Amino acid sequence: MNIILMTKLFNIFDVDLALRNLPFILEGLPYTIMIAIAGMAIGLVFGLFLALARDSKTFLLRWPSRIYISFMRGTPMLVFLFIIYFGLPYIGIELSAIAAAILGFGLNSAAYIAEINRSSLNSVDRGQWESAKALNMTYWHTLRKIILPQATRIAIPPLTNVFMDIVKATSLTAVITVPELFQKAQIVTGREFDAMTVYILVALIYWPICILIGMLQERLEKRYSVYVSK
């Protein structure tokens, strides 16, 4: 029974084919990492301001941010990539596939990050704000020195999940010709006619990347645990 099972497994995954094509597929890894990191960076910055705007008392800040967040969370990422890469040229804005991918993931992830940030900021005791105000600290100084360090510790796990999702979702950029991991895998599939082996190989490449991100999460949690009230 075990021999039959092993035979079937070897038929599903061709080790020799995988090893021969691994270097070519890995050529797409730098694009995957670059798009994920750049998109996350844009999302973190824009997401913070979206979170602050969403809870603002000013109508002109609060409602546009709510509409933006709702739209981004309610539309597929693939559709948004198509809008940026294929749609914007109709109004005279042309972006390279890589630039479109980075912008797309940055703007889209900002909506999810904004909700994470908003929840994390609101979880910090309001007394912190009041104490800072009593000390004549400005809003931005209070936010940067007191509130954000505490909120960051709370936000790290969900933000890590967002980053993992971005890394895996970069495979969508293959449809707009970005030469990342999955696009390279599609080329190999068309050449070798063994989709199962190639796609399992790609999955085995994404997996350790996400493991490393999880390890980074643990280090960041320890780093910011100093801000957690005992």
Image (spheres, rainbow, N blue to C red):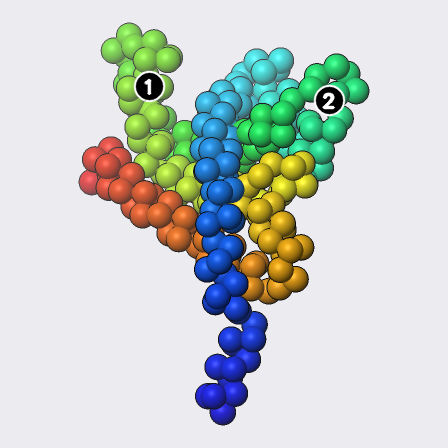
Residue 87, quarter of picture: top right
- The residue positioned 51% from the left and 55% from the top of the image is 21
Q: Position of residue 117 (x, y in %)?
A: 45, 31
Q: How crowded is mark 2: few (under 14 residues within 10 Å), some or many (20 or more)?
A: some
- Identify the secondary structure beneath mark 2: helix
Q: Residues within 10 Å of mark 1 (few under 14, many from 20)?
A: few
Please, which residue is most extreme toward the right here? Answer: 90
Is 76 situated above or below 137? below
Q: Residue 88 shows which numbered tag? A: 2
Q: Indicate the quadrant containing the C terminus: top left, top right, bottom left or bottom right.
A: top left
Residue 143, quarter of picture: top left
- Kindly identify the amino acid type of the residue bearing the numbered disc 2: Leu
Residue 82 visible? The answer is yes
Residue 62, quarter of picture: top right
Q: Where is residue 119 in the image (x, y as percent from the top left)?
A: 46, 34
- The residue positioned 61% from the left and 15% from the top of the image is 59
> Which residue bears the numbered disc 1?
144
Is 95 situated above or below 140? below
Among the two numbered marks 2 and 1 on one chain, the one whose residue lies closer to the N terminus: 2
In this orientation, which residue lies closer to the viewer: 92 or 51? 92
Numbered circles on residues, count: 2
Is 225 situated above or below 48? below
- The residue positioned 31% from the left and 48% from the top of the image is 215
Residue 118 visible? The answer is no
Q: Residue 168 shows which numbered tag? A: none
> Looking at the image, is mark 2 or mark 1 nearer the viewer?
2
Q: Position of residue 155 (x, y in %)?
A: 39, 37
In this orientation, which residue lies closer to the viewer: 90 or 48? 90
- Kindly identify the amino acid type of the residue bearing the numbered disc 1: Arg
- Identify the secondary structure beneath mark 1: helix
Q: Where is residue 169 in the image (x, y as percent from the top left)?
A: 56, 44
In this orientation, which residue lies closer to the viewer: 221 or 208? 208
